[in-house]
Amino acid sequence: MTISFKDRVAIVTGAGGGLGRAYALELAARGAKVVVNDLGGSRDGTGHSDAALKVVEEIKAAGGEAMSNGGSVTEYEQMVEMVAKTKEAWGGVHILINNAGILRDKSFAKMEMADWKLVVDVHLNGSANCTKAVWDMMREQTYGRILNTASSTGLFGNFGQANYGAAKLGLAGLTKTLALEGAKYNVRVNTLAPVAGTRMTEDLGMPEMLFNALSPENVAPMALYLVSEDAPTNMICGAGAGAYHAAYITLTPGVALPADERTPEGIAAVWDQIIDRTGEIVPQSGGEQSQVVMAALAKIGGLGA
């Protein structure tokens, strides 16, 4: 089986370098027309560059079709304009990869709220802006593939990245709701947590051999699969150095307590049972938590217990 993107139009944000560049190049190599969006600048979001133009030149030199866009993902109107120009040029948008991001790393004690707000604005609100700009079009054409970029920091935590982690886990939550809302319109939405050596990670002091192994090109296969025609939906996947995996948000069966035991002491007494993962599930929607609650209550005689 060969996965092709012929006759597909893709927008990749933050595509002037690193992961976004790798995604854009590979999508174009497989036949997609690609909008290379990049505001440019350094990893903290300052400065400007012509990085997007260089990636477009690479794509065209290889025989592909691409155009650049310098809009900021934090400005909704600019994203709407980008999508409108894309539709005018190529007829629609089938794929969106929300990849743009910045870092403002500090421990929470030392972090200024301006750094908190900017990182959340770029990663979480920026992805929402881009997605909202294509959402109605994808629903109307009954086809869309959207990939949000999470992080191990969002899924599992990392010292000094409270702003980044909050935004990244927020994107996983956005994905899960949009996957449900887009299902009947054939709009599939997934989350990717990449591990890659890019400008975002270049000064972390990792050995050169590891930095090279963590090339963006080793993440791109998972990204492209998750925006392909036969992609799954509502998944959280990871990729790095040629290793690929999935992450899940699970729910244990838990314990229901009789009315006279519903105290902090009662919780402490059954804590080991509450966190016992035997029989845990992977909910596909928020409503399944209510089902787990009702199942636990049934064991002690229902709501009247």
Image: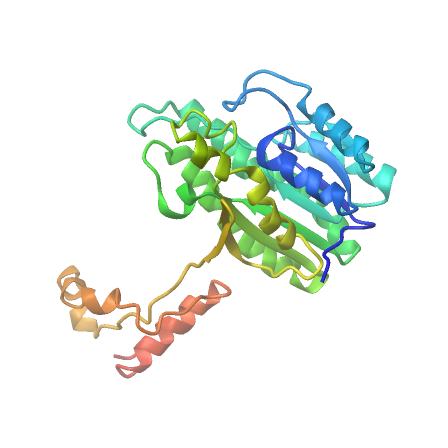
Res 189 → quadrant: bottom right
Percent across and percent down for residue 251 are: 37, 65
| Residue 64, placed above or below residue 292 | above
Comparing 222 with 140, the one in front is 222
Residue 254: x %, y % from top left: 29, 70
Quarter of the image for the C terminus: give it: bottom left
Q: Residue at x 73, y 24 (%)?
A: 53
One can see residue 15 in this view: yes
Q: Tell me what residue is drawn at x 47 percent, y 41 percent.
A: 195
* Percent coordinates x, y for residue 158 in the rendering: 35, 38
> Toward the viewer: 273 or 209?
209
Q: Nearer the viewer, residue 31 or 83?
A: 31
215 relative to 225 in the view: left or right: left
Q: Quadrant of the N terminus?
A: bottom right
Q: Is residue 303 visible?
A: no
Using the image, determine if residue 283 lies above or below residue 191: below
Residue lying farthest to the top in this orientation: 47
**How far across and how far down the image is residue 21, in percent?**
64, 34
Q: State which quadrant residue 299 falls in.
A: bottom left
Q: Is residue 162 left or right of residue 267?
A: right
Colour pattern: rainbow
